[in-house]
Image (cartoon, rainbow, N blue to C red):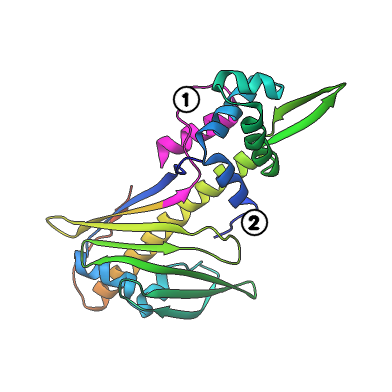
Amino acid sequence: MPTPANLDRTLLALADPTRRSILHSLTKGEARVTDLAEPIKMSLNAVSKHIRVLERARLVRRRRAGREHLLSLNPEPMEAAARWMAQQRAYWTARLAALDALLTAEDQAENVPHKKGDTR
Amino acid sequence: MSTPKTVTVRVTHRFIASPERVFDAWLDPAKASKFLFTTPTGQMVKVEIDPQVGGHFAIVDRRDGEDVAHTGEYLEIDRPRRLVFTFGVPKYSSLMTTVTIDIVPLESGCELTLTHEGVPPEYEQPNISGWTRILEGLAANL
């Protein structure tokens, strides 16, 4: 099962409701730290810590415009995580089908009438 | 930091075989080597199963000349209804996830529900952007 090496950072970054809320705000466009702190009623320091986690996970990008730091969303790691989840589901569906085939083959060897099960 | 909330991958499959046969296959090295943690092109190198609560397993598959180990620990063994184990691929990720197998007997055969927890957190708020739609789609599907 292919698992991106940086998946941990993405998942850990997303595992917090405040950080998900920050990402949600950034879906509307670039924002300053102060813009992000206001709706969640958090100190700038606390919000900055969350933003650093998001930056390390590459979910948030930072650029300078004069004296201001503007933050924006980078969806790529999120999409990679989504692809990984789809792979997980396909993987387990295939494993259960393989188990079914294995048990069905045993039945056939014993001449037991059977029909195959199905995955939903 | 709050407790991580994880989305769950869930797959259900109906078997004609009895709950006992389906359950036992997960803890039988000969059978597990044929369906669990294998890929069609992979070659099973090692299967070690210590089928008791607190016992560990290691299943090593060779893919394109590369050995990939799947390891974990059994947390719950309630034959033939429920099996819970942790599971990870140390080579790719330090993340340990939890797999729960629930087996419900049917008039003929049984229904198995596999729940894999410890994958990305769900996103519940309504939104318009592409990546959040991806997440919502996942949460609805999984």
Vertical placement of A21 versus B23: above or below?
A: above
Query: Label 1: which residue?
Result: B125
Three-letter amino acid code of the residue under disc 1: Gln
Corner quadrant of residue B62 = bottom right
Residue pushed farthest left? B107
Percent across and percent down for residue A8 are: 59, 52
Is residue A4 shown to the viewer in this render?
Answer: yes
Residue for point 76% across, 25% down? A70
Pointer 1 local density, CA inside 10 Å: few below 14, some 14–19, many at least 20: few
Percent across and percent down for residue A89 are: 45, 50
Pointer 2 local density, CA inside 10 Å: few below 14, some 14–19, many at least 20: few
Percent across and percent down for residue A27 are: 62, 24
Marked residue chain, label 2 = A
Three-letter amino acid code of the residue under disc 2: Ala
Query: Label 2: which residue?
Result: A5
Q: How many marks?
A: 2
Residue B134 lies in the magenta stretch: yes
Corner quadrant of residue B99 = bottom left
Q: Which residues are magenta?
A: B117-142
